[in-house]
Amino acid sequence: MATKASFNANEWAVLKDAPYYVQAAINAAEGRMGLMEVKREKKALQTYLAGYKGNNSLIKAVIADEGDANAGKKMSAEEVGDVLGDIADMVGDKTNDGEYDDFMDFLIGAGTAIADAASEKLLKKGDNISDEEEEALDLIAAALKATEDDKLARSRTAAAARRAELKKRQDAAKKVAADKKKAAEAKKALEEAQAKVKAAEEAEEKRKAAAQRQAAARERRRKRLAEKAAKERAAAAKAAAVEAAAAAEAAKKYVVQAGDSLWKIAADRLGDGNRYMEIAKLNNLKNPNVIFPGTELEIPEK
């Protein structure tokens, strides 16, 4: 089992800060945050780390070392993703598939705890995290090679290795069939290998189903965002139309000011003072030479 001693000083300097690089990735997706949000996320991560009850020695060592809470804070989302990818490679080189998945699930859990805390009281009941945070978690999982697809691929590789081992044991069982004691031992080993293959195949089916559910969830989120954008565009178009109609209606009205005459109004609004009689007829003015300030006039089409 991998421990702190499995890594050199430079590797451990990065690895011990892994939970905080996850936090930096979530923060990059959220954008600027208020002081209360920062405190809430910090507390959520501390609570998550303190509450770890597993037996993974590497995870315990990372928690015990209390990494740098500012790790990755000044990096871009792409840079943080690169660091998480490096962490995944380092852990993958020193662990087996089970230990690797445990460590990556631990980091994904940290990201989920942070995202849940960031969204507390900000989202509708029943909606744990925002679309941006969910997308950030997907990107983190991809960088850590911890998506359901990644796990499924590792499961398939392990299953293939177990099937190869099964065949090897089967061949060995045939060779020692003449020896009853050895035959009995080989039979037991074969049964154990068969049980492992069956368990691996069942686990593979479960991972496949989980990957399909994840893909369906991403598609639903994509459709929801597209529908939201379409509604916003329609609302903006409607508002613009109403504003244009109001402006056009306002252009048909004019309030008489001191010193105005119909000829002056016709020249200003219609471009031709000689059309003053059109204004007089439209407004039923008996004497076009007499108008009063404050009177609202309808203006004919230009």
Image (cartoon, rainbow, N blue to C red):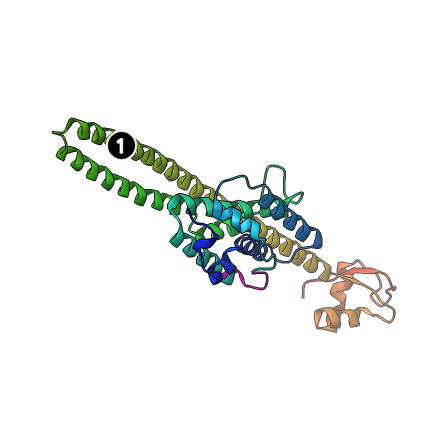
Please state the horizontal and vertical placement of residue 262, each as a whole percent of the image.
Answer: 80, 68
The verdict on residue 294 being magenta is no
Is 256 left or right of 220, judged from the image as shown?
right
Figure quadrant of the C terminus = bottom right
Please state the horizontal and vertical placement of residue 240, each as a whole percent of the image.
Answer: 63, 56
- Farthest-out residue, left: 178
In magenta, the rendered stretch is 72-78
Crowding around mark 1 (Cα neighbors within 10 Å: few <14, some 14 to 19, many 20+) is some
Judging depth in this view, the residue of 77 and 95 nearest the camera is 95
Characterize the magenta stretch by its predominant secondary structure.
loop
Judging depth in this view, the residue of 180 and 266 nearest the camera is 180
The verdict on residue 77 being magenta is yes
In terms of image quadrants, where is residue 268?
bottom right
Please state the horizontal and vertical placement of residue 152, each as a whole percent of the image.
Answer: 36, 43
Q: Which residue is mark 1?
A: 194
Height in image: 72 above or below 188?
A: below
Residue occupying the point 26% across, 32% down = 194
Please state the horizontal and vertical placement of residue 163, each as a whole percent of the image.
Answer: 25, 39
Residue 252 visible? The answer is no
Height in image: 95 above or below 297?
A: above
- Amino acid of disc 1: Gln
Q: Secondary structure at mark 1?
A: helix
Residue occupying the point 55% across, 42% down = 52
Q: How many marks?
A: 1
Residue 246 visible? The answer is yes
Judging depth in this view, the residue of 195 and 66 nearest the camera is 66
